[in-house]
Image (spheres, grey):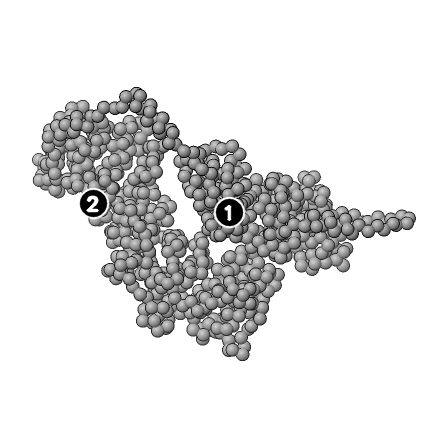
Amino acid sequence: MDAIICDLRQRDQRTLESVTDLTTIRQCLNEPLVWHSQYPDLIKYSAWTRHITTLLQTIVPAWSVILEDRTSPERKALDQTLLTAPWTALPTALDCLSDGALLKQSVMTVYVDLLRVLTTGPSLDSFFSDPQKDTILVANALCSIPTKIANVLELDQVSHAWYLDTEYCPKLARRLANHPTSPLTPILLEKLIRQGYLETILPAIYPIALAQVRQEQNDVWVKLWDRLPMTDKVTSAMLSFLRHTLDETTLPRQARHFSLVFLDQERAAPFLLHAIQRPAKGADTLTLRFAVAAALFATSTQKELLEKQLSHASRSILQKTMARLIQIWTDPIFVQRHAFQEHTYTSSALLLIAGYLPREDLQQLLIECPIVAGVSLWFQGSDQATLKLGLAVAETISKLSDDEEMQFKSGILGKETDSYLFSIMDLVKKQDAFLPVEEEEEEDSVQVTLPSDDDESEEEVAELDPDALDDFDAASSSDEESDASDLEPYPMEDESDTEDGDAKAKRVKPRKPVYVVDLLAYMKDQDEPIKLEMALNSAAQVIRQRAGMGTELEESAQGLVNRLVGFPTSIEFEDMEEHLREALVALMVCAPEAAVPHSIDQIFNRNTSKSRVFVLLAAITLAVRELAGWKTLDVNKAIEEATDQTKRIDIKSPTTPVGQVTRVSRRAEVEKKQRENTRRNRLSGLAGRVFFFPLLTGWWQGAYGRKPYWIGNDPRVSERFVMTLNVILHSATNTPDKRSIVRSYLEFALTLRFANVTPQVTQALLMGVDIVVNVNYNGQEGLLVQDYTRELVQIKEWMEEIMERVQADELKQIALTILARLADVSSKAY
């Protein structure tokens, strides 16, 4: 062996001295393979590592023209050598590629192709099967491939390239899932999650993990998830992934399968709390039922569940979760400030778990965690929808825990008018964990089509045998013969001109989209600027034409919002921002309940640019005004209409007329003018639930964490955000949501009173207060004082403080107007 090692070192040294000699290069590629076939342990010595380094650092840059051809004998020998020790070749090849700016295009192409060879099929499996190597180094190298190649090639990427993270990471995840016990697996999995690929790799991992667990009946995957420090993040991503596959009929089987892969008795409780307190995006009652059933499957035996008997661990988990839910449900901040969707989700979870608990456990829990005091909060100062939801929960809990003669029955809820609430009340009967689980051998609980790892080029790589030798001369002669036989005459000039003309004649300009589905398809085609421009110019018209025609618009609303917000900025169109705003306004007006909440989510999304945030806020402003019956098409004019001080009522004392007063009836003229100005207020029922409270909830969620990308960190965005709230506040004057909106806005403004905000934001807040006292409660001074006594006192102190300490004349003028109005309100109320 010592002699072979010495010969290998000498061969590498001669190669370095005569790198331009092709014969020497071929000997350096061929002879070590012969030695390796005779002495397989040769790869364990440092001389073999040095040999691979010589090949990659010296031979590849010097002979890239030959090595670029995958079928050349030299390239096959190089591939075979690297595959003998991929854990050595991979980091070295990545280091060579790091100096991409100094490399020729052909050299970079060879390095990228060699990385593909090293991360394909059996060579990729070898990283998991050898526990003796440096797993951290290998994990870092495997995870850095997409980034390093993308940085080197820059704009040379193509949408289907193997090295893109959307292609590479799922392939790596499938190989990882096939080796759950390898020391490399948890390190590599944690690395992929930290890099943000969790949602990309889960669809590839879960079906394989499920098949392994069902076949081997072990807890290897549960232990693997336990080793990861980011359990909450994994839980959210897993629920978000499985939410799209949940089905009413197969939910028990899906929950049981999930518990086998992801849960045990220790993980069940934190999993259930996380699923309820931090629901995945788009979570619904089906997701809740799935989470509760999965937790029970993990903590009770199948026999106990079939007999509808919960184990001690299951009862303990449900009791702790129920106690936490009662604490949240009776929190005044939760009742007053959180959105109606959160109220519904938490109430659904509370009733669902109450349906599983035995009656004696529920009665004991209600003694320890009284819910009666919390119910009264839902009846005080709330809108009708919130009040009815509180009634639904109170009636259902009373029915489960009290005797029949003591049960609470309000008599307000009707099955026809409140069918949605009755569906929530029926959740106490949805005991999916108690249903028999029917296993299906040929059908998995998650249907995912996984692409094959092996394409045509990879099959060639898989056939390479490290111990096989090539006949260089024979291969070279055969290549020359094949090249000669492939020669074909190219077309003459006249022929090519004719073909070009035919091709141009066949090009047809895309038609204008007519349906929402066509519009969405045009926007998805990012490589066709003509389609993008046509879709953008006609988006508002198509959306308004399809309004009220089936469910097409509602079903495509979120996808349209995503495409409009993510519209490529690299392509410039005439009036692009204006067309984007018009399309979003049309979408929010025609499908408000589907489009507006998702648009608000995009406002607080860290990936949304500031320019798009301004577009979204402007679209919300115009949509609110249009739904309220206004026809303002300019966002600045809409804000001016809602906040113009000159349109406030005159608070001066009326002058006493002198002399004879002549009374003339103008009733007919007034009634005619009222009929002309009467507009249908479609904002009723939407102002708070769809627009105002989701915006305010998003603001507070970002404020609590003070995240770097929170919109409150930007003064200009903050000012526009407050002005958007002002427009909603002004437009909601004659809606049922007015009272709750005004209360929440005053709490919002008085909280920001002590915050470090710019004068522009303060001015916007004062305009909102002015709207409350001069517009929302115009002619209702007594009701204003009765409902907001404490807030009015604080507002008066705030205005006096501005008059004394602030130098800005505009702020003083608004503060003086509000103080005068407060004095007038006080005199009229008492």
Q: Name the residue under label 1.
A: 546
> Residue 606, image x and y in percent?
47, 44
Residue 31 lies, in percent from the top left, at: 11, 33
Secondary structure of residue under mark 2 = helix
Give the amino acid type for the residue marked by disc 2 in the picture: Pro
**Number of disc labels:** 2
Q: Residue 122 carries which label?
A: 2
Q: Which residue type carries mark 1?
A: Arg
In the picture, which quadrant includes the N terminus? top left
Q: Residue furthest right?
A: 659
Residue depicted at x 50% and y 50%: 549
- Few, some or many residues within 10 Å of mark 1 (<14, 14–19, 20+): some
How busy is the neighbourhood of tag 2: few (under 14 within 10 Å), some, or many (20 plus)? some
Q: 53 or 532, which is in the foreground?
A: 532
Seen at 58% across and 71% down, the residue is: 411
**Of the image marks 1 and 2, the number of the one nearer the N terminus:** 2
In this picture, residue 162 sits left or right of residue 646: left
Q: Is residue 244 above or below residue 50?
A: below
Q: Is residue 607 rendered to the left or right of residue 809?
A: left
Q: Distance between the residues labelled 1 and 2?
A: 53 Å
Residue at 58% across, 42% down:
720
For numbered disc 1, what is the local secondary structure?
loop
Q: In this view, does 364 lie above or below 81?
A: below
Q: Nearer the viewer, residue 583 or 2?
A: 583
Could you say where residue 99 lies in the image, as x and y percent from the top left? 30, 31
Task: Using the image, determine if residue 532 lies above or below residue 248.
Answer: above
